Image (cartoon, rainbow, N blue to C red):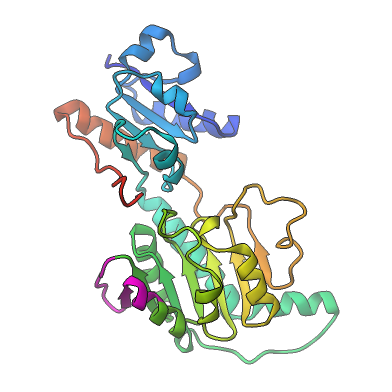
Amino acid sequence: MSDPIALITNIRSDYEASYLSALASAMPAEKVILFRQMSEEQRAHVQIAIVANPDPADVAALPRLVWVQSLWAGVEQLVTRLPAGGPPIVRMLDPEMSRTMAEAVLAWTYYLQRDMPAYVRQQRQGLWHQHAYRKPSSLTVGILGLGSLGKAAAARLGDAGFKVAGWSRSAKRLPGIQTFSNGDGLVALLRVSDIVVCLVPLTSETRGLLHTGLLGIMKPGASLINFARGPIVVTDDLLAALDSGHLSHAVLDVFDEEPLAPDSRLWQHPHVSVLPHISAPTDFETTAAVIAADIGAYRANGALPCSVDLALGY
């Protein structure tokens, strides 16, 4: 039996139990133990910690730690809360998560393309009014972030007939997609997009990225989908753009604080769809399979998975 693996979480107990069960099934030769149930001797020998919103003190209590494996794709909390110079952090890159995210992006893009927000408002008013149909090919969907999630979403949208543009920090080329990069590229993408989909990681550079200035250069009547992280969009600035009619609708799955406060204006705003962070839920079995493969490689030859660039934040 290898050294034990610590599972450190601060999440719902049923989710924690599901992760533990899936990891045990995927790695029958390993011993995955909840950190709080470990003895001091076991903690002294842990080389790998699998984490979800961990207490930094728990991670620091593992003196032989070689790497920290996140159960989630977003690692901004780990990057900011864990001490600099600690073991490398590995974010979750699960193909099933990319597929699920692409599915959600397509579903809510269809929602906007087919004027569903307007029909929801009309139903509440008892109003019977038909809107002109808009073909997918008549709309440009701009994707902010062309990592694994953004690439999958772009491909799915392209297959559905939408014109797709994408923006990334560094220049990228993707077949069938108009790509932009850097500051000027971001402005250019926002100006041509009918629907903007935010999929960038939260870093010091992207916090507050979509503010009054950039929201104001979006096409009049454009819509926003934020499936990344709440603080990337300045909420008050977004509400002002919606209130003025410059933007027509926002689909928000992420917020500055979660759960969303009961008194938030977003709940009742007629031009906002609120989702409870469900666009790309982690799949327990496929996540466990990805982790099992990485740990298997490490046990076999000491190979570490690709880790987060702490300077970039992802």
Foreground pick, 127 / 92: 92
Give residue 141's position: percent from left, percent from top: 45, 77
Give residue 311's position: percent from left, percent from top: 30, 48
Q: Is residue 288 above or below residue 155?
A: above
Foreground pick, 247 / 275: 247
Q: Write down the quadrant of residue 84 in the picture.
A: top left
Tell me, yes or no, whether the highlighted magenta stretch contains residue 122: no
Give residue 267's position: percent from left, percent from top: 73, 60
Residue at 80% x, 76% y is: 123
Give residue 202's position: percent from left, percent from top: 44, 54
Which region is colored magenta?
170-186
Q: Write down the quadrant of residue 5 in the picture.
A: top left
Residue at 67% x, 82% y is: 245
State left or right for residue 281 relative to residue 235.
Answer: left
Q: Is residue 217 above or below residue 151?
A: below
Residue at 55% x, 88% y is: 134
